[in-house]
Image: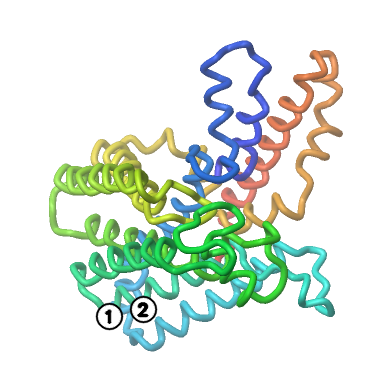
Amino acid sequence: MLMISGGGAFIFLLGGKTGIEAVDILAAQFEHPEWHGFTFFDFIFPLFLFLAGVSLPYSINSALAKGLSPAQIRWKTCKRMLILIALGILDKNAPIDIFDPAHIRYGSVLGRIGLATFIGAVVYMKFSKQEIIGLILATLVLYYLALILIPVPGFGAGDLSFEGNLVGWVDRNFMPGKLKQGTYDELALLTQFPAICLTLAGILAGQMLLAAKSGTSKVISLCITGITCIAAGLLWSIIFPINKHLWSSSFIMLTGGMAFTILALFYWIIDVCGAQKWAFFFRVIGMNSLFIYLAVRFIDFNASSAMLFSGFYKYMPNQWHEVFNALGGFVLVWLVMYFLYKRKIFIKV
């Protein structure tokens, strides 16, 4: 959420302005590759999906302890999914024209999180840990085989180009509404399957954290799993390139492994070592993630930043104006989040 709410834009805009190579390299990590490849910016959405899975064992176990039946929990997560799908459509299409459904984009970040959480809840209550692992691996292998072996009319089998991939063909022929990239949409149909695997992987991580083991043992388990997944993803990328647009199986393994590893790091620092005060800055943003995700879409914080702070940064060289304006916008976002945090106002679905 720090990156989405303006931190990422600030770092990206530093590129080419400082004369420091390390800063330019860092700034380049906040732009998505055009097709194959990977940057840190690609990791943000997969981490959302993974952490949604981490929370499920906690929330579902708590609901079961309160006397809710599995059917009631499924209905609750189903309603949440439908609300997130609706909010996602609004987010991607505002101002939305409900009388022109053919030009509405139905795939969305929020919709994918809602669907993945619903499927994850159903899977968690029905399958064992070993079965979930098998389900993840089977899904990723079948997805790989489908993209490699199923021929696309006019392109043949195994074409992973922008124009000729199976994902795009399925989207063009079966996905209603508007496709983001014209020939395909990375948030449409086929890519739902590998994306859901990240939430299932998060469920496994949540189960690790709930296990009756020492904190150090949990950290080791998370790290081993993470490193194994990263290695598997890199090896798989030799024959199935890492590609966020296609949500390739190698991309899922890489980002899933990174999520396990980073979760281990933060769990060790915050829970095992007890160093918590430093995280307050981030907690203010994270506690209202849904609100801030939509707020930065519908509220122009950069325009407010220009009105409030341009009198100060106008004396800087012109190339720095957008940098300081982005920083000012991010400060305003954080202050809004702090206002809500102090008053214990948390927007949830």
Q: Where residue 271 sits in the image (x, y, percent)?
A: 28, 44
* Residue at horizontal 60 percent and vertical 45 percent from the top: 4
* Residue at horizontal 83 percent and vertical 39 percent from the top: 303
Residue 216 vs residue 319, the one in the foreground: 319
Specify the amino acid type for callout 2.
Val
Please indicate whether residue 75 sits to the left or right of residue 99 in the image.
left
Specify the amino acid type for callout 1.
Lys
Q: Is residue 202 above or below residue 276?
A: below
Residue 11 vs residue 181, the one in the foreground: 181
Label 2 belongs to which residue?
122
Report if residue 346 is visible in the image: no
Tell me the SS state at disc 1.
helix
Q: Where residue 185 sits in the image (x, y, percent)?
A: 62, 62
Please give the label number shown on residue 319.
Answer: none
Q: Where residue 349 sits in the image (x, y, percent)?
A: 55, 69
How far apart, in angstroms, are the residues tagged by discs 2 and 1?
Answer: 6 Å
Q: Is residue 164 above or below residue 220?
A: below
Please indicate whether residue 197 sits to the left or right of residue 89 in the image.
left
**Discs 2, 1 touching: Cβ within 8 Å:** yes
Q: Is residue 61 above or below residue 238?
A: below
Label 1 belongs to which residue?
126
Please indicate whether residue 239 sits to the left or right of residue 195 in the image.
left
- For disc 1, the neighbor class at 10 Å (few under 14, some 14 to 19, many from 20) is few
